[in-house]
């Protein structure tokens, strides 16, 4: 007679590193199952996938026994690992933070195939490539035109920043020279000289009177 499932719990745990401590213990503790038994079985089942995050779906029965099914690692986790980065771009596709090859995307698609809504490896590749694009990871061999355009924009932005920095340095040097006592010359025009002479004549007449 089949046992009744009273609860299903999904977790994402580093392969081979489950412990009864939080967050595993926090989530599974209230379910009343043997935490140490679960951790031991999970770690044995995922030992060969060390370094990956392996989702697990746990079915808990009325008598507090359990079964679990391992899922494939999250696509984002596999992409970050392949690219050698800790996180994707905060600006999505507008800011490229890493580049992968089509072959690397294909390997990830092959891993994810059982859990993707795809009927062929090409469809799976497109799904994984779409996730990569949203994370700011370019795929050489799939979106080369977009990659070249963004590399061009990055080079132009770098050149503009360098020009601005040079202008600021020049302005700072000029301001420093002024603060250190740079002389300022004022040229007197012909009209200014006539005005000065008229002023002097007026002052002389006033003193004679």
Image (cartoon, rainbow, N blue to C red):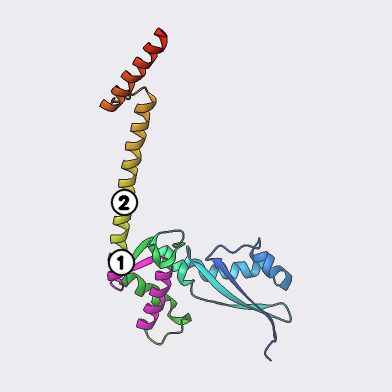
Q: How many marks?
A: 2
Q: Which mark is residue 25?
A: none
Tell me: residue 182, above or below residue 76: above
Front position among marks 1 and 2: 2
Relative image position of residue 62 (x, y in whole percent)? 73, 82
Per the picture, the main secondary structure of the magenta-coloured stretch is: helix
Residue 140 shows up from this direction = no
The question of residue 136 being in magenta is answered with yes
Kindly identify which residue carries mark 1.
Answer: 147
Of labels 1 and 2, earlier in sequence is 1
Direction from residue 5 to residue 143 in the image, left or right: left
Direction from residue 4 to residue 178 in the image, left or right: left
Kindly identify which residue carries mark 2.
Answer: 160
Q: Nearer the viewer, residue 107 or 101?
A: 101
Are the residues tagged 1 and 2 within 8 Å (C-beta)?
A: no
Direction from residue 193 to residue 125 in the image, left or right: right
Q: Residues within 10 Å of mark 2 (few under 14, many from 20)?
A: few
Residue at the (46%, 84%) spot, across then down: 117
Residue at the (33%, 20%) spot, across then down: 198
Tell me: residue 110, above or below residue 195: below
| Residue sticking out furthest to the bottom | 1
The question of residue 206 being in magenta is answered with no
Relative image position of residue 185 (x, y in whole percent)? 30, 24
Say what secondary structure mark 1 lies in.
helix
Magenta residues (range): 121-149
Relative image position of residue 17 (x, y in whole percent)? 56, 62
Tell me: residue 31, above or below residue 22: below
Residue 128 shows up from this direction = yes
């Amino acid at each position: 007679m089949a046992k009744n499932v009273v609860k299903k719990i999904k977790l994402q745990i580093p392969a081979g590193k489950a412990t009864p401590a939080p967050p595993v213990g926090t989530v599974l503790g209230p379910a009343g199952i043997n935490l140490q038994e679960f951790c031991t079985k999970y770690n044995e089942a995922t030992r060969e996938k060390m370094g990956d995050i392996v989702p697990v779906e746990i079915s808990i029965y009325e008598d507090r026994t359990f079964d679990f099914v391992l899922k494939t690692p999250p696509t984002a986790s596999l992409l970050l690992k392949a690219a050698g980065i800790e996180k994707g771009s905060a600006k999505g596709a507008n800011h490229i933070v890493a580049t992968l090859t089509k072959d690397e995307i294909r390997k990830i698609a092959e891993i994810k195939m059982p859990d993707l809504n795809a009927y062929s490896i090409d469809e799976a590749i497109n799904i994984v490539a779409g996730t990569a694009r949203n994370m700011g990871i370019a795929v050489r061999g799939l979106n080369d035109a977009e990659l070249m355009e963004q590399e061009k924009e990055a080079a132009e932005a770098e050149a503009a920043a360098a020009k601005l920095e040079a202008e600021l340095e020049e302005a700072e040097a000029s301001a420093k020279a002024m603060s250190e006592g740079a002389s300022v010359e004022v040229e007197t025009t012909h009209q200014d000289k006539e005005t000065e002479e008229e002023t002097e004549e007026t002052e002389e007449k006033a003193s004679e009177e």
